[in-house]
Image (cartoon, rainbow, N blue to C red):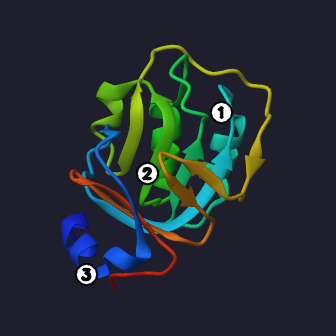
Amino acid sequence: MNFKTTDLCDDFSNEIQVIGSEFISYGNKKSFSGPISTVKVFEDNVLVKQSLETIPSGNVLVVDGGGSRRCALLGDRLGEIAQDRGLAGVIINGCARDTSELSKLEIGIFALGSNPLKSQKAGKGEQDVAVQFLGAEWNPGYFVYADEDGVIVSKRKLVD
C-alpha cells in the first residue's frame, strides 16, 4: 500500500484525526497502515504480548500506556513477535526499549521515547477498547496511516 499522510490529509481532511510528530520511529518500516487493534495498560505489558500473539496479521496494535515514560512496553522480543506474525505496526503511547534491535525489524514501531527498564508483569489492563490520547480517538476497527510526517486515524479505509 503506497500512501503519504500529507496526501491523505489533503484529500480527506474533513474525516480524519491528525497526530503530528510526537512519535519516534523505531522499526525499520517508516511507513505503515492497517486496521486498529487496541490495548490499554499502565507500566505493564502482559496484555501487549497477548495482543501481539492474537490480533490479525496486517493490523496495527495501538497501545495506550498512559503516556508513561518510566518503563518500556515493547522490546526486541515483542517486536519480533509482531514482525513474525505479519502485523503492520505498533504505536505506543509510552516507551520502547532494545531500540537498536527494533531498528532492524521489518515492521513499523512508533513510541513516545525509549527507556531501558522493563515493565511490570501483572496482566492488568483492557483489550479491544476505544482509547484516547494525543488528541485522537483510537477505536478497534478504525484505520491508521503512519509515516515520517505523522499519523492519521480514519473511521474507514482510505487507500487500497
At 71% from the left edge and 35% from the top edge, which residue is drawn? 46
Q: CA distance from mark 3 to mark 2?
A: 31 Å
3 and 2 marks in contact (CB < 8 Å): no
Residue closest to the far front: 14
Distance between mark 1 and mark 2 Cα atoms = 17 Å
Image location (x, y in percent) of residue 143 = 48, 70
Q: Nearer the viewer, residue 92 or 55?
A: 92
- Name the image quarter holding the N terminus: bottom left
- Disc number lying in front (1 or 3): 3
Q: Is residue 152 left or right of residue 35?
A: left
On the image, numbered disc 3 is attached to which residue? 11
Separation (CA) of disc 1 from disc 3? 37 Å
| Position of residue 106 in the picture relative to residue 16 (left or right) | left
Instruction: In the rendered view, tell whether residue 123 sits above or below residue 150.
Output: above
Query: As shown in the figure, which amino acid type bears the numbered disc 3?
Result: Asp
Residue at figure coordinates x 41%, y 37% from the top left: 111
Going by the image, does 46 lie left or right of 71? right
Q: Position of residue 29 (x, y in %)?
A: 27, 52
| Residue 63 falls in image quadrant | top right
Q: Nearer the viewer, mark 1 or mark 2?
A: 1
Q: Is residue 78 positioned above or below 13 on the image?
A: above
- For marks 1 and 3 on the same chain, the one whose residue lies earlier in the sequence: 3
In this view, the residue in front, 84 or 158, is 158
Q: For the residue carrying disc 2, how many other residues have a C-alpha within 10 Å: few (<14), some (14-19), or many (20+)?
A: many
**Label for residue 83?**
2
Q: Secondary structure at mark 3?
A: helix
- Whether tag 1 and tag 2 are in contact, CB under 8 A, the answer is no
On the image, the x and y values in percent for residue 31 come to: 27, 58
Which residue position holds label 1?
A: 45
The amino acid type found where label 2 is placed reads: Gln
Does residue 4 appear anywhere in the picture? Answer: yes
